[in-house]
Image (tube, coloured by chain):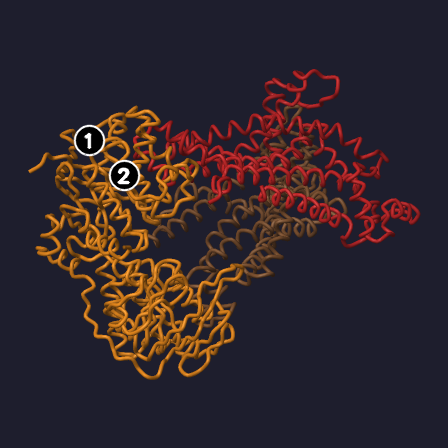
Chain colours: A brown, B orange, C red
Amino acid sequence: MRSIPLSALVGLLFVALYFIGAIFADLIAPYGMAEVVGDVWEPSSAEHWLGTDSIGRDLLSRLIYGGQTTILVATAATLLSFAVGATLGLTAAVMGGWADQVLSRFIDLMMSIPTLIFALVVLSVMPVTLLVLILVMGLLDSTRVFRLSRAVAVDINVMDYVEAAKLRGEGRRWVIFHEILPNALSPLVAEMGLRFIFMVLFISTLSFLGLGVQPPLADWGGIVKENKDGIIYGIPAALIPAFAIATLAISVNLVADWILNKTTSLKGGRDG
Amino acid sequence: MGEILLDARDLKIGATVYPAGEPPKDITIVHGVSFTLEKGKVLGLIGESGAGKSTIGLSAMAYGRGGVRITGGQMFLNGRDILSEGPSGLRELRGGEVTYVAQSAAAAFNPAMRLIDQVIETTLRRGLANREEAENRAIDLFRQLGLPSPETIGKRYPHQVSGGQLQRVMTAMALCPRPSLVIFDEPTTALDVTTQIDVLAAIKKAIHDTGVAALYITHDLAVVAQVADEIMVLKSGRTVEHGDVQQIIEAPREDYTRALVSVRSIDHEAKPPAAEPLLQIKNLTARYPGLSQDVLKNVSVEIAQGQTLAIVGESGSGKSTLARAITGLLPPSKGAITFAGRRLSDKLETRTRDDLRELQMIYQMADVAMNPRHTVGTIIGRPLEFYFGLRGAQKRKRVQELLDQIEMGKNFIDRYPAELSGGQKQRVCIARALAAKPKLIICDEVTSALDPLVADGILKLLLDLQAQEDVAYMFITHDLATVRAIADGIAVMHRGKVVRYGPKAQVLSPPFDDYTDLLLASVPEMKLGWLESVIEHRAGAQD
Amino acid sequence: MKLLAQRLTLGLLLLLAASVLIFMGTEILPGDVAQSILGQSATPQALANLREQLGVNEPAMTRYFDWLFGVLRGDLGTALTNGQDIATAMAGRLSNTLFLACSAAVIAVPLAIILGVIAVRYRGQWPDKLISGVTLTSVSIPEFMLGYIAMYFLTVKFQIFPSVSTIHEGMSLLDKFQAIAIPVLVLVLVVLGHMMRMTRAAILNVMQSAYIETAELKGLRPITVIARHAFPNAIAPVVNVVMINLAYLVVGVVVVEVVFVFPGMGQYLVDHVTKRDVPVVQACGLVFAAVYIGLNMLADIVSILSNPRLRHRK
């Protein structure tokens, strides 16, 4: 606890930086999101640190606003995915029986279709708004959270201390919240980081394919799409938001790894 | 004095551990141990968990498990210092001159290879024999070790053979390349007593017939006394005492050895049977959902207030299932349970809070019987809150009283289970059961996972508490020594049935039924020649 | 054998259920499908025509079974946007996509296994750390970014390869391979990270078994330990890992095709999602799901076959 490894520290720093940037985008961004301020694809300069984009908007400002959208959508979808997945997963594990069977088989079925493909199928008939995106991403991803939380809870549910609580006459609420949840929390928190990364990659991919966030609103994937034609002329503008996506994902990964290691070594201490 | 085979001089062994949230640190497991072993002799290494006995055993192959490494001293085998050997010299040594028999043969065999191929692997690799000769030798060894159908058993895969047989196949594997030293690492610990005795006899005979020397590692002094010529007692990586078998078990010099020898010497006078039973089980039959066979068949037993009924049996006898049926976790298909004058509902969900409170349970593995995220105070305090509505200072005071009763200090109240030793954990579990003021506590193998001296302490505590609180115990165990120490009545279970039932004195004296006879005879006794007398007794019984 | 038959049946059932799910995903959503396809400004006449064409007026059950039996006969319907027969339009694209994906798999699978073994062999040393560092990075980078980085450096800065990966019937195999070199490279990178990490874990798990210690204590050479004792037990988990990760390829291929304007299934699907051409989307979704389910089924079958407990009963 006292010593945080360097990799996790770097990860934490970057995650904090990105979140602060997203929250205070209006204050930080030097120009407006949709404001045309220069020529097409100007190189980096004192006025435009990262240059301008395909129609002459300030790329840095766009990146900051884009980050706001990406992080907002990814966070909301992750929270939704956890709220639905963990609740159903824990309940299925504790209830067992047919309720568990029905839920688990349904989730198996949902997972038999690749998430991106399923999302594309659904988005082909839905109006593409932020709310719909969050709902589709969150619900599709909750299948994975369900699997994990159910697996963790099933493992804990057979422990003698849970049996002891049941023999004492404790209700289902006590068993879930006092016996199972405290022990399931750390793997779930670490998984939350991984799900968040997946959401960032997911929304970016959808927007890149033109099926996510719609113009004039932008997110990082959308900015890549807007500027991708520049690549052929040797203009790397499209790589910059992609770089932002990658650094955010790696940073969250480093933090999640650290949390996971911390908790597994805690378990090791318990067994030893 | 014979020729010296193995000579360990001031052996020091260490390891690197990685405690949570701290930098890795080096610890010492063995602090300078010396011994010699003559050709053809057997040295028993004995000690409790953490004594370093397996680590020393493996060092005779210059092998360290995980992060373990030999940090000092010398180990001579046939005059050659094996600790300074390079990789090719070590390969020569391992599996050739020195071989190894592991505790769990089921895990130690490659699941994807036929047994015979694994048994003769080293013999072939070293070119000691051609395939046919090697197979014949293996079959001879199978026969010597008393394995059924020795010609064909090698054609099977590990999962097709029982645990006791696998352990013998592994012994054959160790003997096949004609080593000069075999290391037996707790080879019978994972087996039931009636199986253990066969394997033990087979190992002893094989050692005798082949004239091989052996290091025999175990925590059970009575077992090692049957096979060893000399015994070395270890504690926390140091030698406590080293002598021949007779001296160690008949005239131990050190206090620690004396404690090991006299373990389970608790004197407990059985109470007379009472007229009014507290718990009455009538014709109980039960099976697990989805299985076609009954695990409990027509079981009827009674327990009186303040008395102890021991349920004895081997794995698969149904003794733990009986506990599950009584607690309501497994509703029986037939039969009735009467407790404190009222008929208990079959299902846990429909029992009253008093039913639940007065019937408490203590588990074998204290580790997993306590929520690792709760403090001792919460663990013991929750039943007080749940059943008696105690809160705040009142609850805390009562928890401290209970901690006193289990002979632990008040300052343990804010500790987590991870900070307790094995014995302390089990004591906290006892306190949690006591907190409910129960009339009956079901104890499921509560001492099996503990070292003998610690287990002894727990048994004494349970007897004291029974005297103070007038609580009844249903004591489930496979260990007859424990039964002798604690029981008033005994029920012997075998394949789901009660085969013998009555007051302790009556159950433990002849005439016996066949199974009880076998079971009683199989419990290792701490005297020389016990193994031979049992084998003789059994041969007599079969005639 | 019984287990295999069970697994095959389960796979078919799953596919059937997936078809229901895909159908439901496009049909039973809130709102008027025709309206959402044509937009708010559509004339009532156009809406009515489209509803007729979609058969929205009939009950969903009837339409599902019509669609399903059509699919079983090889009739995937016609595209709304250009009236083309979907099966015909798809055939060429499917073979292009398979060509791309298989080329990537042929490189990625052996590479991932070799690197996984190296990581285990040098566990905790620099090769292992390097490999896991690269793995962490590659699983954190979106597929399209890998694509554009490769495009930027290999085709624009250094001009080693063409930037657009068009392939057509008349090209020689060599030309085809040259055309798909960069997309294949990107796909390999996409899959490699996941596959390597899981291969490493699977092999490590086997290497920590008690029977590996037994083999070491027999004084066998490390290579013998690995070949005779570790390898036979590692086949099932590793094959499983490979199959699971080939599923990433299914998703990766969609994005990579768009990046490189490659005439395959992914491009086809994305184009028609944008145009809201429901029959095409359903057909593509079903094909992707079938491949995915098929790969998972194959993984299970291999692990059943290589498990001695199941091959040799008691």
| Marks 2 and 1 belong to one chain | yes
Three-letter amino acid code at disc 1?
Answer: Ile
Q: Which residue is mark 1?
A: B82
Q: For this rendering, which residue is in front, C29 or A175?
A: A175
Three-letter amino acid code at disc 2?
Answer: Tyr
In the picture as drawn, the residue positioned furthest to the right comes out as C45
Residue B152 rendering spot, x and y as whole percentages: 39, 38
C171 is higher (above) or lower (below) than C295: above
Residue for point 11% across, 35% down: B4
Secondary structure of residue under mark 2: strand
B306 is higher (above) or lower (below) than B525: below
Residue A122 rendering spot, x and y as whole percentages: 72, 47
Residue C209 rendering spot, x and y as whole percentages: 38, 40
When asked about the image quadrant of residue B79, the answer is: top left
When asked about the image quadrant of residue B323, the answer is: bottom left
Secondary structure of residue under mark 1: helix
Tell me, for residue B100, which label it has, or none: 2
Q: For this rendering, which residue is in front, C159 or B200?
A: B200
Q: For this rendering, which residue is in front, B381 or B537?
A: B537
